[in-house]
Amino acid sequence: MEKTGKKVGLVLGGGGARGFAHIGVLKVLEENKIPIDIIVGASIGALIGGAYAAGIDPAKLEKMVIDFEKSETFRSSPIRKFEDAGAEAKSGGMLRKAISFIKAGFWGMQSLLKQGLLSTEEFEPIISYFIPDIQIQDTKIVFRATTTDLRTGKQIIVSRGPLRQAVMASCAVPGAVEPLAHGAQLLSDGGITSLAPVGAAKKEGADIIIAVDVGKDISMETEMRTANDISGRAGDITSHCLLNYELKEADVVIRPNVGNLLWYDFSHARELIHEGEKAARECLEKIKNSIDFKKPSKMKFLPRFLRKFFTG
């Protein structure tokens, strides 16, 4: 598509491993030559968006994600322990559930002693696997990462400095990954203040916004038996309502079918990428119409009396 003079912003939301669906969306947008002037990402959206903005094409990104699960970087990462424990709990059997319970207790104790189960040093190799060592100012597409200052409670839009550092701060899942100290700020997950930072994209000058929502499916069939279940459910509902409120400001919202996968469940990458492609194709016509609709009318450049003559 030809440039319209309006800036097209792509907002990639947070959602842990569910965010691999963003790659499928990028594949479809690139295939159809949808112009993207600025990418704003939160959490996993910052990881995928930062890599793409830096020049890694969707096909290569897809291969990197598929290879990641088999890589030594992932195998030696503490994140693998989360996934393994989750699989043990799901697989049933008293022994497996007992092992999972013990691990959960160990991690619970660790959470009382540290700011995150994973230190920034442990998390950094994962970020470096996907993100090149460049400055944000040097990305091929203008890129912004959102993060949250835990001290002030404010959203921080990172526009300068090391790309890896910005993405790592945006991806620092509360409790799981240690927040990043940056001067007087203590930076954590961008999804805390906004799972899909549409407002940030507007602040950065985007006129037309395509947002990708990879939040959890809010529908729930399982029973809520404990206080923790109720508390967690309440938090999910609050996040869902705030997310939908912000998404109202987007011109197009793409919602891949990502279900309720946990943030550390990296074993469904292929299916998630496929769901991203599918959802983006379903929105293609709306995307093109939104960009066309926002084109400045040539009529407005005519003198007023000529516009009146042509339009009656």
Image (tube, rainbow, N blue to C red):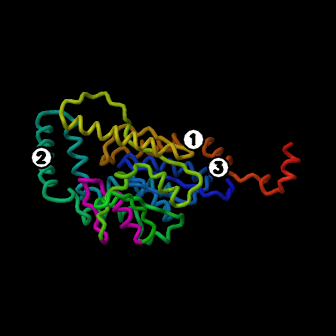
Q: Is residue 296 left or right of residue 113?
A: right
User: SS class of the residue under badge 2?
Assistant: helix
For the residues labelled 1 and 3, the Cα–Cα distance comes to: 12 Å
The residue carrying mark 3 is 291
Return the residue nearer the eye: 7 or 307. Answer: 307
Kind of residue at disc 2? Gly
At horizontal 56% and vertical 57% (from top left) the residue drawn is 206
Q: Is residue 271 visible?
A: yes
Image coordinates of residue 289 in percent, x first then y, are 65, 44
What numbered label is drawn on residue 283? 1
What numbered label is drawn on residue 105? 2
Closer to the chain start, of discs 1 and 3, is 1
For the residues labelled 3 and 2, the Cα–Cα distance comes to: 51 Å
At horizontal 48% and vertical 60% (from top left) the residue drawn is 52
Closer to the chain start, of discs 1 and 2, is 2
Residue farthest to the front? 305
At horizontal 30% and vertical 48% (from top left) the residue drawn is 264
Q: Give the magenta range.
A: 161-183
User: SS class of the residue under badge 3?
Assistant: helix
> Closer to the observer: label 1 or label 3?
3
At horizontal 79% and vertical 57% (from top left) the residue drawn is 301
